[in-house]
Image (cartoon, grey):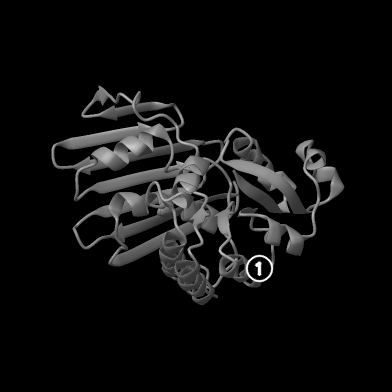
Amino acid sequence: MLQTGLIGNTEKLEPFVNSLRKNKSFDIIGKASSGTPGALHDFHYSIPEINRVELIERADVLLIDDSLSRPFPILSDMVKKSKHIFMVGYLNLTTDECAQLVKLSNESGSVVQVYNPFYYSPAMQWMSSKVSMPVFLEIMDFSGSAQTNEKLYPIILMLLDITGISPKKVAAVTFKSAPNKSDFTNVRLEFGDASVVNLNYGSIGPLKEFRIRSYSQNQFIRLNFTERNFFCNNEVIDLTEFEKTDEFISFSNAIFRKNRLKSSLEDYLIAMHLVQKINKKMNQFFAE
């Protein structure tokens, strides 16, 4: 079993702890937690609190969230010691820092996986294996009020496995509406193989929606995650062979070298560069 430590905000880590406890590959040995006592949940008291330095030394695997203000020195220390890392949130790193971590992890054999909530659903697993290229993807995400980067990272990480390449052209437009506190952003990504991703997201009143449409040669796919109906060429998609995959199964398989790591640190670096380009395009709409 992999000796596993938790570092960060216990409230954010709780859902991942519940998944870890169901996976026989991981044994949670302790935590170095942050957060106020009022925000702590029951599991906080059933996992021993350990000094962070000692926890890093003892653990094979570390779960870390985005609550650390300066994560790079801690991550560097972990990677140099060949610790395996699951990043629960999208950590506050610069692209240079992330590139250094990629280099260090390649040298040390450390496996670093980044939280990728969309990719591991049965519908997305099906789409990743079946979609024809080139493709026009239309994504509508009005599922919550997350900050811009928190919206972009999971979608981009999901797309990297489908498209397989970074876009050649990026365009973005964004609007905010003060009266009803709504916002709308459109991002258009054009790829070298003629594939196009058209992403709309934000918050529009009571609308709660997350869906994907895919158009390619002889193939029209509709995935409605809100209403949980999925079609290809107007026929219901059979998802029975694509059970929902626990990200920690993929993570442990990568550690034991059973398969290629998805949602890797390299993928996160690509996503960081792309988010920077998108934010630069959007900043022009907020210039004085």
Q: Quadrant of residue 27?
A: top right
Residue at 79% in and 52% down: 35
| Disc 1, SS | helix
Residue 151 percent location from the top left of the image: 51, 52
Residue 275 as seen in the image, left or right of residue 215: right
Q: Quadrant of the N terminus?
A: top right
Q: Is residue 97 left or right of residue 273?
A: right
Report the amino acid beneath label 1: Ile
**Residue drawn at the location 43% of the way across and 40% of the way down:** 120
Vertical arrangement, residue 159 with respect to residue 281, above or below = above
- Residue 193 spot, x, y in % from top left: 19, 59
* Residue position marked by numbered label 1 in the rendering: 74
113 over 23 or under it: above or below: below
Q: Residue at x 43, y 33 (%)?
A: 225
Q: Position of residue 115 (x, y in %)?
A: 52, 50
For the C terminus, give its image quadrant: bottom right
